[in-house]
Image (cartoon, grey):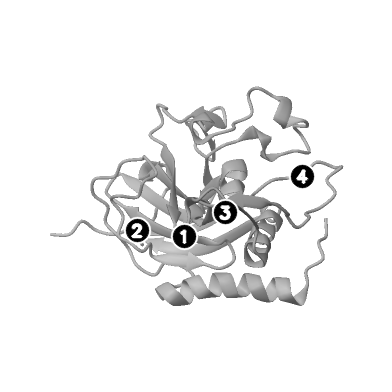
Amino acid sequence: MQYKLTLFTIMFAGMLTQGYAQKNKLPQVQQTSIWMEGFEADGKLDEWQQPLQAYNDDTHIAYSLANDDQYLYLAVKSDRTSKIFTGGITLEMVKDDENVAVTYPYNFSYNKRKHRNTGLNPNTPKKISDLTEIEAYGIPDIKTNIIPLLNEYGLQAGLYYVKEGEGDEEEKEVFYTVEIAVPIQYLQITGSKELNYRIRLRGEIPSPDFEGVKKPQGFHFKSDGSMVPFSQALIEKMYQKHLDLYNPTELKGTYRLATKPD
């Protein structure tokens, strides 16, 4: 599938992502190791140092990795809410034999080529509380790839949302914050204590009759009750997010396990 991108569209997207990274002076890939204490898989990121350790332009996510003596932890914050709701965040750990990959949230409707008319399916997730499954590959103990959020294998995950920005509530930016925890015992980490990883956002696989992305039009209500049209900047931002929904992205890095501080 191909999309026509104007020079303005490309430059606008670049300014958005580069501006965030430059403002926060964050690297594209995490450079440090972090010892985690008091982790709770609720998606709220209360136990994480802010800002997160890296912001990656290709994936449009801020993220941090951390560990204790039992778990590897991932925290993600992103404005790609539809992409995360539909296709989830995948943390993949590279091993010598078979990689371990954990995706949360798992939403079967991400594959519109396989699942048609998901909007009419009563089982299609429609809100955060409906996202109750994790997808896991490469863990021998797990015989079925789709497991419940509350499971016997030690995998943990959580999703939350926050609004940030100035102006009316409708004008604020919505971010998803995601946490994933994977038991270290599944990762076969060698004596170097280093782990090669990928973080992926697969987004949505469109149906065969998908006609492409069109720029949105519409209005929103301000706090005083008045109705105003979308600004050109907001239209462009919404358009970029919609394009990215169908664009699988990933980042790669190496994480060295932290040791417990004295």
Residue bearing the label numbered 2:
191
Between disc 4 and disc 1, whose residue precedes?
1
Front label number (4 vs 3): 3
Residue bearing the label numbered 3:
80
Q: Is residue 120 left or right of residue 56?
A: right
Q: Please name the amino acid that badge 4 sits on.
A: Pro
Q: Secondary structure at mark 3?
A: loop
Q: Please name the amino acid that badge 1 sits on.
A: Gly
Q: Is residue 155 left or right of residue 146?
A: left
Between disc 4 and disc 2, whose residue precedes?
2
Between disc 1 and disc 3, whose residue precedes?
3
Q: Residues within 10 Å of mark 1 (few under 14, many from 20)?
A: few
Position in image of residue 157 (x %, y %): 42, 39
Q: Residues within 10 Å of mark 2 (few under 14, many from 20)?
A: few
Position in image of residue 197 (x %, y %): 49, 57
Res 206 label: 4
Q: Secondary structure at mark 1?
A: loop
Front label number (2 vs 3): 3
Q: CA distance from mark 4 to mark 1?
A: 34 Å
Front label number (4 vs 1): 1
Number of numbered tags placed on the structure image: 4
Q: Residues within 10 Å of mark 4 (few under 14, many from 20)?
A: some
Answer yes or no: is residue 243 visible: yes
